[in-house]
Amino acid sequence: MKKPGMVLLAATEVLLMAVSAQAQKPAVQGYGRAVVTILPKHSQELPVAVRSGEVRIKVDGKQARITGWTPLRGANTQTQLVLLIDDSARQSLGTQWSYIKNFVEEMPHHTQMAIAYMEYGRAVLSGPLSSNPAVVLRGLHIPANFAYGNASPYFCLSNLAKHWPSQNRAARRVVLMITDGVDEYYLRYNPEDPYVLAAIHDSVRAGLIVYALYWRNRGFVDGTGYGSYDGQSLLEEVTQATGGENFWIGIGDPVTFSPFFRELRTDLAHQYELRFAAPHISKPGVEYLHLKVIAPAVKIITPQKVYVRAAS
């Protein structure tokens, strides 16, 4: 029979060997990419050129290394944009048709666009991605205007993220949602709404930059405080997580989409693609991103979350 002291000594030796082996494993890093918007603080100022040496980032609270910092400008920048319209929206949305048409027609010629509608939890594309405005606008029609027909705008966004109409991962992927933001499956404001969190996760994983424009839906909810404020708060949560913006003016529909479309075009003209190497995280997944720019007089719009993949 072994003595207790000998058993303890053997167990200690095994534990030390395991710790030593673990320490000798090479550090494995993840990698990822994000799109960052950097604007002058005052619109009359010239655009600010920011160098990678002026940028500091942390991923999951740990210092990360920048491996790429590329301005997304010019004809060589590939951009894909899906205009995701809530099919439950009130038909008064038709008053914005001329502004939507102008927006599509005025986008740079190298931008591919498509129109999709939120229907029963899906994003139903009206046509393929195209750089021809006439082709894109063929799919524009008045919403069906049936109450709760979208199921949830967040179901539809998740569906679009999982079935993006292109396999080109090099292109910048942008979504502009036109909706009230109300989650019919979770009719109380909660920043931990599981369907909103799922939409954020799916969007970040697919590399989407989500923007939102508020327009009321048909149904009694939009006449309540929930529809006016809480739905927009959920849209704010999604856009901040993905690096986009939520365009809204408070209670009620905007008179015109024109200034918001102009602001979106300005954002797209002042973006950088950030590539980074991050300290190893147990498995690939969505992590928090913190970015700081050491440059005066700039406004930064950065995604709160990024998808980190395992290094090959």
Image: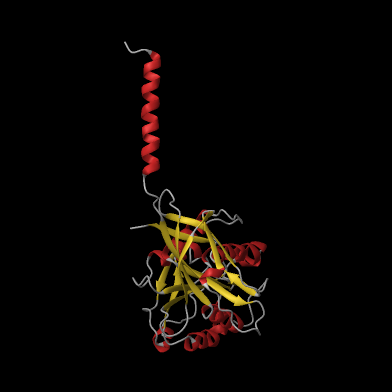
Q: Which part of the image, by quadrant, shows the C terminus? A: bottom left
Decide if residue 28 is on the left or right side of residue 40. Answer: left
Kindly tell me whether residue 199 is visible in this rendering. Answer: no
Residue 254 quadrant: bottom right
Q: Which part of the image, by quadrant, shows the N terminus? A: top left
Up-down relation of residue 214 to residue 278 (above or below): below
Q: Residue at position x 37%, y 27% from top?
A: 13
Residue 246 quadrant: bottom right
Q: Residue at position x 57%, y 74% from top?
A: 38
Decide if residue 50 is on the left or right side of residue 139. Answer: right
Up-down relation of residue 117 to residue 1 (above or below): below
Foreground pick, 178 / 289: 289
Q: Residue at position x 43%, y 55% from top?
A: 285
Decide if residue 157 is on the left or right side of residue 180. Answer: left
Question: In the orientation shown, which residue stands out farthest toward the top?
Answer: 1
Residue 259: x, y in percent?
61, 83
Foreground pick, 94 / 18: 18
Residue 160: x, y in percent?
42, 67
Kindly tell me whether residue 135 is visible in this rendering. Answer: yes
Q: How is the image coloured?
A: secondary structure
Foreground pick, 136 / 64: 64
Decide if residue 248 is on the left or right side of residue 157. Answer: right
Tell me how many marks there are.
0
Residue 109: x, y in percent?
43, 87
Q: Residue at position x 46%, y 69% from top?
A: 118
Foreground pick, 116 / 200: 200
